[in-house]
Image (cartoon, grey):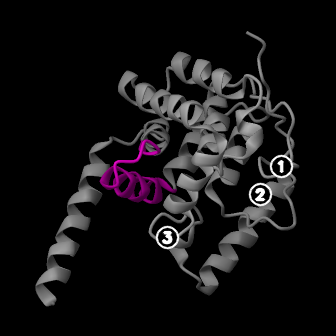
Amino acid sequence: MQTTQLNNSTSVHEPITQPTIGHSDLKLLKVLSLLIDYPSNELFLGDTLADCTEIVAKSTLISPEVRAQIIDLIEDLIDTGSLEAQARYDGLFERGRSLSLWFEHVHGESRDRGQAMVDLMGQYQEAGFEISVKELPDYLPLYLEFLAYQATIIEDDIQIRMDIADVSHILALLAARLEGRGSLYKGCFNALLQIAGKPLDIVEEYQEKSAKRSVMTALKH
């Protein structure tokens, strides 16, 4: 198979032809960035999704169960095609804030979020990672792409894992909500939690908390 590669110096949100995946074990982050991001037409070109499947299948960073979850998502994307995948993505991630892929889960629209974005931009610039002026730096797929880029130049996988662990509460919340909706995208977030060294039990904890809140809300009415 000819390996499709994602250019580590560009953003997934810029037009790409044959995207590349780096050589670090954490190249899996590049795959997850692609899958969690909007399924652009480029994702369906050539061997991109087939190469993603190969990388996931060989990854030792995640459990066999989670590998199977991600491969199910990739196969579903291939079967449905770009138009249906895009429509489904819009309905899932881009309507309302419950599955927002920005870090507003932490800061909302407060001044703290603004400072957090300034800090992230500083990290990107220091690493030589360029993004479009139209992009917000706290967009999760973009952040994952940055970490995948970092993994190819700093050779410090532990630091990369710690950076993911710092947002593990966001990942667990999104995984729980996706699980509740029966979405195959849950596998990507389960994978990120495992890379960060977090047990998937925390997803169940978030599900239980959500169920309790729903009950309390219903009782109030």
182 vs 73, left or right, is left
Dot 1, crowdedness within 10 Å: few (<14), some or many (≥20)?
Answer: some
Residue annotated with mark 1: 127
For the record, the magenta segment spans: 167-186
Q: Residue 123 — which label?
A: 2
Residue lying at 47% horizontally and 45% vertically, measured from the top left: 185
Q: Was residue 14 drawn as part of the magenta stretch in this picture?
A: no
Q: Where is the N terminus found, in terms of image quarters?
A: top right
Given contact means CB atoms under 8 Å apart, are the residues at marks 1 and 2 in contact? Answer: yes
State the residue at coordinates (59%, 39%).
32
**Of the residues shown, which amino acid type is indicated by label 3?**
His
Q: In screen coordinates, is 36 left or right of 70? A: right
Q: Is residue 62 visible?
A: no
Residue 173 visible in the displayed image: yes
Neighbor class of circle 3 (other Cα within 10 Å; few <14, some 14-19, many 20+) is some
Residue sticking out furthest to the bottom: 221
Which SS does the magenta portion mostly show?
helix
Q: Position of residue 66 (x, y in %)?
A: 40, 30
